[in-house]
Image (cartoon, rainbow, N blue to C red):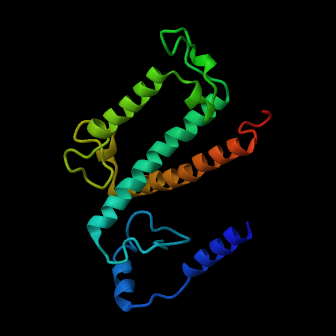
Amino acid sequence: MKTAVIATLLATATAFAPAKTASKASALKSFEDELGAQVPLGFFDPLGLVADGNQENFDRLRFVEIKHGRVSMLAVVGYLITEAGIRLPGAISMDGTQFSDIPGGFAAVGACPGAGLFQMFAFIGFLETFVMKDITGGEFVGDFRNDFIDYGWDKLDADTQFEKRAIELNQGRAAQMGILALMVHEKLGVSLIPGGN
């Protein structure tokens, strides 16, 4: 435990170390005005993943961050709904197993019939392969509308669009931490719902 705390403190201290070369500082400045570089941290890249200033690499990492954020937002909602005891009506499989028989959290994986798990992974694979991708080139990284759905986005001015994208990015970041915390609390045996067991 002490070793983990010391390692964490050392890793945190290195984030505040001065830049070694001016070229890295100038490369990082190219991302200072990007979406997500917000108060209080500004542009935060402690591992130096885009220290070389490569815009293509930055866009790929931003795409992955947005996608993980969206999945995490759905995961938090789903986790809390199942923990509250809300289930779909009916049977999950032909053997008569009801949705209400499947527990929430990690225990659901072992209790779900094999065919049900296959259906979930096949659906996720379908989404990854055919839906969750930028087919038409979009206006920005993570724009999956593909000239199909608008929901009034084009009627918003550029500042409002930037603000809404920043809100989504921050909510996704928070959800990634949130789903991690929910999973840790479950493993620790702490109730996720106030007043629960």
Relative to 174, is 54 above or below? below
Question: How many numbered discs, if any?
Answer: 0
Residue 124, percent from left and from top: 38, 34
Residue 174 as seen in the image, left or right of residue 24: right
35 or 183: which is nearer to us?
Answer: 183
Q: What residue is at 53 percent from the left and 51 percent from the top?
A: 176
Q: Nearer the viewer, residue 112 or 149?
A: 112
Res. 159 in view? no
Tell which of 27 and 181 is nearer to you. 181
Query: Where does residue 160 sit, x and y in percent of width and height?
Result: 39, 54
Q: Is residue 133 visible?
A: yes
Kindly identify the residue that appears in the image at 52 percent across and 51 percent down: 171
From what the image shows, is residue 100 above or below residue 163?
Answer: above
Question: In the rendered image, which quarter contains the C terminus?
Answer: top right
Say if 126 sits above or below 30 in the image: above
Residue 102 appears at what percent x and percent y? Answer: 60, 22
Quarter of the image with the N terminus is bottom right
Residue furthest out toward the left = 136
Residue depicted at 49% across the width and 73% down the height: 46
Residue 111: name its quadrant.
top right
Compared with 157, 30 (above or below) is below
